[in-house]
Amino acid sequence: MAVDNKIRIGIIGAGNIGNVHAGEFSKLGEECVITAITDAYLPLAVERAKQYGIANVANSPEELIQRSDIDAVIIGVPNQFHAPLALQALAAGKHVLLEKPMGINGDAARQILKASQASDRVVMVGHQMRWESVPMQIKEQIDRGELGKIYTAKTGWFRRKGIPGWGTWFTQMDQSGGGPLIDIGVHMLDLALYLMGNPKPVSVYGATYAEFGPSRKGIGTWGTPNWNGTYDVEDLATALIKMEDGSTLSLEVSWAVHMDTDNTPFIHVMGSEGGASYRGAEGKLLTEKFDRPIETVLRKADNDEGERARLSRHFLACIREGKQPITSALTGFTNNLVLDAIYESSRTGNEVKLDWDLN
């Protein structure tokens, strides 16, 4: 680290998510400094550098990674580049904060996990929903044993008309790895497994559907469409995931669907002594007392600093203290294994057992 003991950060990707990270880490000036930024479209990196007072604009990710004045790299680029850049950064001795999904598929995630295990560097996946106020309150009660044994959970995120960037990398399997399942489904999968106590998934039965995208229906407002591009991913996915301890998780997500939905992510966690529900910015704890149903409403505080702030500080703390982040490379690999199994189950029509072999 630099003489002033600040963690020096480089950002790869100056688009929407890179902008979010730049904004959050720039607020933590007592703990870190953003040393350099780069983007495939360099004028955008130059714009971000001016916006946040970043001293250096690197001409390429490779140039940024090799800089000796950078301790940690934040990777916010299309999914297909996650593993190549993360592996380069680890090889160069950098800590890594990697946007979700960790890899474009299980093989890519496996490479990152193996490199992480062979390194003393921190690898963290940016699943910000774990740091949202209501899920944190639910997790606290689960860890205290208030829900008893967690035996099943249901989670999902139905967007009615929300296909992003039709024809761009978002809707091309070889660049994104999939549609809503790997885009927003990975968030819900990650958070649900976390709240359930990180049980080990062992098998999956799932199905995916593309009823909107190929017909250019269900288009959302995120991203700029490329009508000369292609759409070869799903627009809805559903799955049942079985864990080693016998618990189960139901997952359903869509970019586009004809149903009554408020476009809000949700989770229902069911335990032997109580349950918890989370939808959007609110949640509930549910149990039974004196033969009556009891509910406790959970909300975030008015002065809540936000999940992105907590995520950013957690990454810096893990670097300083040499500890594993709660969204570690292992959790990222787990998510990718499950996603791969859902896609394979949809292709074959069969239940798929997860392959945990790292070789």
Image: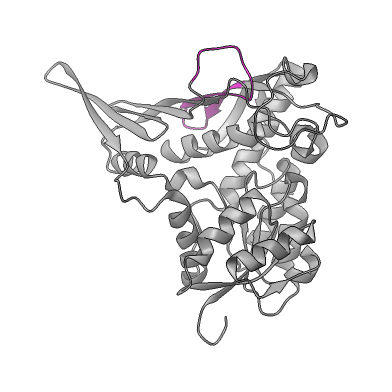
Residue 66 in which image quadrant: bottom right
Image point (73%, 40%), residue name: 105
Q: Residue 327's x, y, as percent?
A: 52, 50
Whether residue 98 is visible here, answered yes or no, is no
Q: Residue furthest bottom?
A: 3
Looking at the image, is 315 positioned above or below residue 5?
above
Looking at the image, is 239 positioned above or below residue 91?
above
Viewer-nearest residue: 270 or 200: 270
Looking at the image, is 206 positioned above or below residue 53?
above
Q: Residue 350's x, y, as percent?
A: 70, 17
Q: How is the image coloured?
A: one colour
Residue 196 part of the magenta segment: no
Task: State left or right for residue 85 relative to residue 229.
Answer: left
Task: State left or right for residue 354 relative to residue 156.
Answer: right
Image point (60%, 71%), residue name: 53
Looking at the image, is 180 positioned above or below residue 78?
above
Magenta residue span:
238-261
Q: Residue 358's x, y, as percent?
A: 70, 48
Q: Residue furthest left?
A: 290
Image point (16%, 17%), residue name: 292
Viewer-nearest residue: 311 or 215: 215
